[in-house]
Image (cartoon, grey):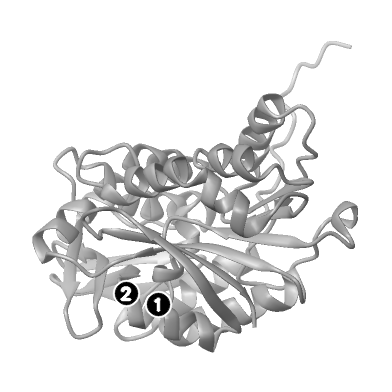
Amino acid sequence: MLLTEEAPARPRTIDPAFRRDILDGLAREPKATPPIWFYDRRGSELFEQITDLPEYYPTRTETALLKAHGLDFARAVGEGRAVVEFGAGSSRKTPHLLRAIRPAAYVPIDISGDFLQASSAQLAGDFPELPVLPVVGDFNQPLDLPREIAGMPRLGFFPGSTIGNMEPDAAVDLLRAMRRLLGEDAMLLIGMDRIKDRDRLIAAYDDAQGVTAAFNLNLIERINRELEGDLPVDGFAHRAVWNDEKARIEMHLEAVRPLHFHVAGACFHMDAGETIHTESSHKYGTRDERLLLRAGGWEPVEEWTDDEGLFGLVLAKAG
C-alpha cells in the first residue's frame, strides 16, 4: 500500500526516574544529579573512550591485575560460580576473569540496554559454552536475577572502583543489597581506587583531549533530548576538582554566564560560576576500604594491587 502522508510520530516515552532525579537535582542548593544518568548509549561510548586515555590509569591498572592474577582468582574462588557483574558496560575486563575461574554462568547488569545487549552478544560469541544472561536495570534498585542461576554459588564482580561514585553511607547500603542478592555463600571481587597525588587524580578526570568534558556535557544533551530541555550546551564548562576533606574527585558542570532554562516544563536559573555537581569519585586507603566492606556485610579475604599502589582488587566473602 502506498502511503501519501507521513505516519504520525510516536510520543516519546520519558523515564520517570530520570525526570524525577533531574528535576529534584536542579531544584536543590547546591545543584547535583546522580551519575547513573551519564550512561545513555552516547555516554557509555564516551566512557569507553575515557578508559583508553593515557591519563586514565584505573582501567589499564585494573586490567593488568586481572590478567596477572588469574591463577590466584581460580584458587581463591573455585570453579562453578555464577558471575554477576554490576555495571557491566562493555565487559572489556571480564573475559580475563571468566577465563581464569571457568564460571557456570555470567550475568551482566547495566542500565544502558542497547549497550548491554551488544556487549553481551560479543561475549557470548567469545565464550560459546557459557550461558550469558544479561539483566537491564539499575543495580542501585531492587533486582531479580535470572532463574537459570538459582541454586548456584555466586561471585559478584564490581570493577572500575564504581563504588567510589557513591557517598559512603550509600556505598554501605549497596554492599548490603549485593550481599542479600548474591546469597549466603557468595563472594565479591571489587575494584577500589586508592588515594594518590592530586595532580594525577585531576588529570584522570580532565584529560587533554577533552573526552571527559564531552562525557560530562553529554548529560546536558540528554536532558535536552529526553526531557524537553533547552539548556545551552555552550553555557556550561566541565570542571574536575579534588576535595581533600572528603578524599574524592568531583565533576561539575559550571555555568559560564547567567543562565535561564527549562526542563520538563519547569524553569531554572543559574548564576555565572554556579555548578551542577554531576559525579564524585571517592578514593580509599587500605584501612578505609576494609572498613567499608565490613560495614556492608563482606569480610575481605585477599587483595591484589599494582607496584605503585594506584589501584586494588579486593576479594571478600559474605560475612
Counting other residues with Cα less than 10 Å from the Cα at mark 1, is it few (<14), some (14-19), or many (20 or more)? some
Q: Secondary structure at mark 1?
A: helix
Q: Earlier in the sequence, mark 1 or mark 2?
A: 2
Is 117 displayed left or right of 284 in the figure? right
Residue 14 visible in the shown view: no
The disc label shown at residue 257, or none: none
As displayed, is residue 44 above or below residue 270?
A: above
For image coordinates 60% across by 59% down, the residue present is 76
Q: Mark 1 touching mark 2, by CB under 8 A?
A: yes
Task: Please name the residue shown 37% across and 55% down the image.
Answer: 220
The one nearer the camera, 211 or 67, is 67
Give the residue type that dot 1 points to: Glu
Quadrant (top left, top right, bottom left, bottom right) of the N terminus: top right
Numbered marks: total: 2
Q: Amino acid at mark 2?
A: Tyr
Q: Is residue 104 left or right of residue 288?
A: right
Q: Which mark is residue 284?
A: 2
